[in-house]
Image: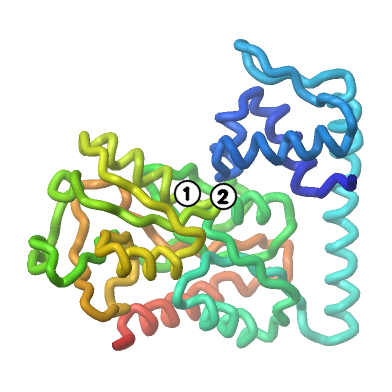
Amino acid sequence: MDIELQQLRILQTVAEAGSINRAAEELGMSQGALSRALQRVERAAGTPLVNRGQAGITLTPAGTIVLGHAETVLPALRRMFSDVRSCLAAAGGRAPARIGAAPAPALTAFVRCVEDLGIAALSLLVDESGRRLTELLANNEIDVAMFRHFPELDPEPPEHVRHAVIAAQSPHVCLPDTHPLAGRAEVRLSDLGTDHFVLSYPECQPLTGHFQTACGLAGVRPRISYANSVSAAITLGEALGAVTLTYWPNITEPRRRHVALRGTPLGAVMMLAWTDDGPLCGLGDQLLDSVRRMHAACAGADHD
């Protein structure tokens, strides 16, 4: 069985953090997803790579060998991809960029903003996790990313990754129009503590964990069901007459009402991040202005 690059990065992060929990937080993954990935790399190696004890995680002798090779392989691969992009840019006259983005309604418009600067979209990675995207930026595996960031709950991107806020986003709950609170301008989680919520649950998606943190702070334990994507969560919420979370309240849905959710740490911002030594060198501020205008247009558009 082959070892994947992401599995090597996970082993590296676990070794540095000394804890599955801390490594999962740094990577923006659930503990279960990280543990399964670690088990896969151990199966590929044919031997345990970590010791799991009360004091934390330590590497076995085999794990030390694998990590030593990983610390040689990963930087070499980053240099290889950088050289390939430079070659493509010289041949085609357009700097190719690897783009990362959250699956927001403005995703297509964001890619167009990048292309309008004369930058060719070499690849597009769609991922809910801002932590994951900033990690890829820090490792020089993508060149620019747009994602949702939770200032009260997420760590700031690394210092060497340039980043700026595109726009603030406030959480809303999407309720059936027959719900007793559907006519209110705003609600709190304590008002919805006995309701049924539907959340999307990709493995690297931070919103579910943040929502549970917010519920704990509010002293409520609502019933929660999970769907494997945002669109599936919306569909399931409609079918069950349940509550869903949204940061795009202008996107209307039949027989549903958006109500502002107040008093939680779930306030977010859309953020743009990029590396100065990549294809956006000298173009980051120009892209930021373009993306801000695009986001304002998308947020104000009529989606009826």
Q: The C terminus lies in which quarter of the figure?
A: bottom left
Q: Is residue 188 left or right of residue 29?
A: left
Q: Pointer 2 and pointer 1: residues touching (CB < 8 Å)?
A: no
Residue 75, image x, y percentages: 85, 47
Residue at image coords 52%, 83% = 109
Residue 124 vertical placement versus 2 (above, below) = below
| Amino acid at the residue labelled 1 | Pro
Please say whether residue 286 is visible from this viewpoint.
Answer: no
Q: 68 left or right of 157?
A: right
Q: Could you say which is closer to the camera, residue 23 or residue 224?
A: 224
Q: Residues within 10 Å of mark 1 (few under 14, many from 20)?
A: many
Rendered-image quadrant of the N terminus: top right
| Residue linked to disc 1 | 206
Choose between 168 and 209: the one closer to the eye.
209
- In this view, the residue in front, 174 or 240, is 240
Residue occupying image coordinates x 22% and y 38%: 220
Q: Which residue bears the numbered disc 2?
A: 203
Q: Is residue 32 above or below residue 62?
A: below
**x and y, in percent, of residue 274 in the image:** 61, 62
